[in-house]
Amino acid sequence: MDSRPIGVFDSGVGGLTVLKRLVEVLPGEDYIYFGDTKRVPYGDRSEEEIKKFAKQILNFMREQKVKAVVIACNTTCAVINKSEYDVVLFDVLKAGAESAALYTINKKIGVIATTRTVESKSYEKNIKIIDKNIEVYQKACPEFVPLIEKGLYNSPIAYETASKCLKELKEKDIDTLVLGCTHYPLMASVIEEIMGENVKIVDPAIKLAYDVKDYLLKKDLLNPQIRGKAEFFVSGDKDNFIKTAEMLLGEKIENVLHVDIEKY
């Protein structure tokens, strides 16, 4: 038994889609969520910047005395070396690759992600470790995150932007599409409509939540309480963060604290 919280972080509101899955699977846990709303999006940042941001956020998480940290940002997962940190880290990207390899039947997988994640080829590498015969088609959709951060994930402009971005993948005969950025599940209904019913849409957070549960069970680290709580921290804008958090989590978010993350 361990009542310490689980840390979850992302560049902004996207990681809330991961937090939602974690709460569904592990409702008794307490969570510390950090959204880097001052420096979002990460997708076009340099590797050096992303490594620096990750180090600052993990220093903050250590201060919060977390028992594990879920990296709810594919771009960060694609860039940092997890073995350099003395914290238990869970990787949304690895969970997404494993899920996609499991679901595909025709061995043709599409991945949509940020520019930095696509350039890293991390999804392709992770999928091909599982099955070298799978074809992986990647597409950067850098326009998605700014739209989602503004709360426009179900708007006509979201549909128009997604149609353009997904056109290339629709021509590849894929049967599985990985949402390779944790912001993208907020546009899942738009993406599903464009791709059609024959393409399985993979939200990596589903497997990730069960990976965390398996680890806590194995190490006897589960929190014994029935219902946990979440604390929210951001580095910048709170307003859209609160709106999106309330919509996703289905509850009133009373308190979001501002953190000067650069001091870490």
Image (cartoon, rainbow, N blue to C red):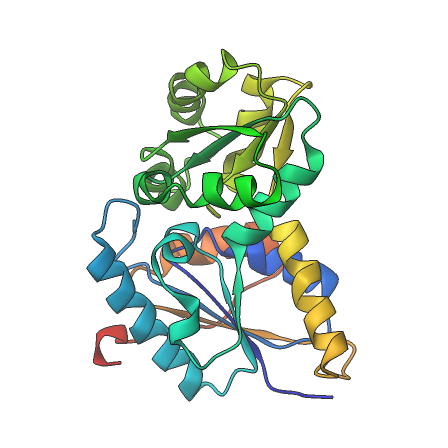
- The quarter in which the N terminus is drawn is bottom right
Q: Nearer the viewer, residue 162 or 90?
A: 90
Residue ID at (71%, 68%): 213
User: Which residue reaches farthest front?
Assistant: 132
Residue 92 vertical placement versus 165 (above, below): below
Residue 230 x %, y %: 57, 72
Residue 227 in view here = no
Residue 201 vertical placement versus 263 (above, below): above
> Is 8 positioned to the left or the right of 133 in the image?
left
Residue 194 vertical placement versus 256 (above, below): above
- The quarter in which the C terminus is drawn is bottom left
Residue 176 in view here = yes
Residue ID at (43%, 68%): 82
Residue ID at (27%, 60%): 50
- The answer to which image quadrant residue 67 occupies is bottom right
Q: Nearer the viewer, residue 226 or 61?
A: 61
Residue ID at (76%, 82%): 225
Residue 3 x %, y %: 66, 87
User: Which residue reaches farthest top?
Assistant: 171
Please give the count of numbered marks on the rendered protein.
0
Residue 163 x %, y %: 44, 17
